[in-house]
Image: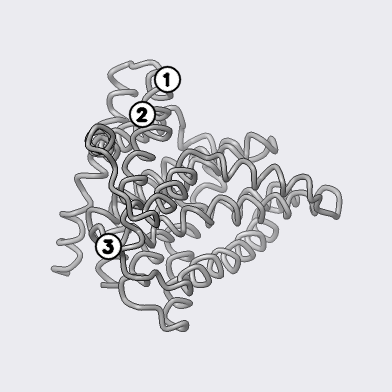
Amino acid sequence: MSSFFHQFALSSPLFLLVLIGYGVARWGHWPQSAAEALSRFAYTIAIPAMLFRMMGDFSKMPPVDARLLLAFFGGCLIVFIIGRVVAATLFHLDGVAQSVFALGGVFSNNVILGVAVAKTTLGDASLATVSMVIVFNALILWTLVTLSVEWARHGEFSLRGFGKTLKGVLTNPIVASILAGTAWGFTALSLPASIDVPLAMLGQTAVPLSLVALGMSLAAYRIRDGIAQSPAITIIKLIVQPLVVWLLARMLGLPPLETQVVTLLAALPVGVNVYMMSQQFHTLQGSVAASLVLSTLISTFTVPLVLALVS
């Protein structure tokens, strides 16, 4: 119990920032355009600046165990299948809706919450593992759900669709900053102070700005809009996925830090990319939007609990 309260004390300020952002947008009557602008700044400038500087020291960090990818994404595949079965049997959804429903159970808010919570609770040593998952996360999971949707619609998957997904991942500011920072780190060169200092200052704003922006964005969604499926998505995301990933990590003999990181990332709430996917395929927009709010709210308590259990 003391471990839970310790983890709660570490992570609760982060979720309080989300709540502040939510309150500013909901009761402060800030326009949604302000949330979009703040989110865009955090996602395209502040977080990439932080990750670039951090990954500049990647060559000096201890090697990251590649088994963590098998533990995390193997768990994602298992839970994705479970999600499709639940969507088909309990809610009688079609193949496209099943795919989006299942994605909600495996696509975490790794960039905004993942980086912040891992840095605060597990320390800077965990960020190399987080970055590795982030690089592969969008490519693997977007490809998985695209394959699932295309198969449900046409019974086939095109290489053109995969190419578009790959291009979108590589040009993503977060992924690009991680790859660029890693490449710079292997040159063994130091950044000039005129560049490093502004990057450091921007990086210091990344966590608070991104969390406030997340809260402001959540204010646009309503829980009642998807009351049927959103609790099921939330249960799969916050309970089933971290359990499956933790079991795989233990089976693979993953070291303690990597086990904690992948379990933490699996325990995070639903990522906003799932809502983007629901809009793209015109299905379950209300349910996914509601699951964003519901899972973020409940994760205030479940994330510290998971951290306490795996630590």
Label 1 residue SS: helix
CB within 8 Å, label 3 to label 2: no
Residue 216 is marked as 2
Q: Position of residue 206 (x, y in %)?
A: 29, 37
CB within 8 Å, label 2 to label 1: yes
Q: Which residue is mark 1?
A: 32
Front-lying residue, 163 or 247: 163
Q: Quadrant of residue 144?
A: bottom right
- Quadrant occupied by the C terminus: bottom left
- Quadrant occupied by the N terminus: bottom left
Q: Which residue is mark 3?
A: 125
Alpha carbon separation for disc pair 3 and 2: 30 Å
Which class describes the residues within 10 Å of circle 3: few (<14), some (14-19), or many (20+)? some
* Residue at 34%, 17% in the rendered image: 30
Q: Amino acid at mark 3?
A: Ala
Front-lying residue, 41 or 222: 41
Q: Position of residue 83 (x, y in %)?
A: 60, 60
Question: Can residue 119 be spotted in the picture?
Answer: yes
Front-lying residue, 50 or 238: 50
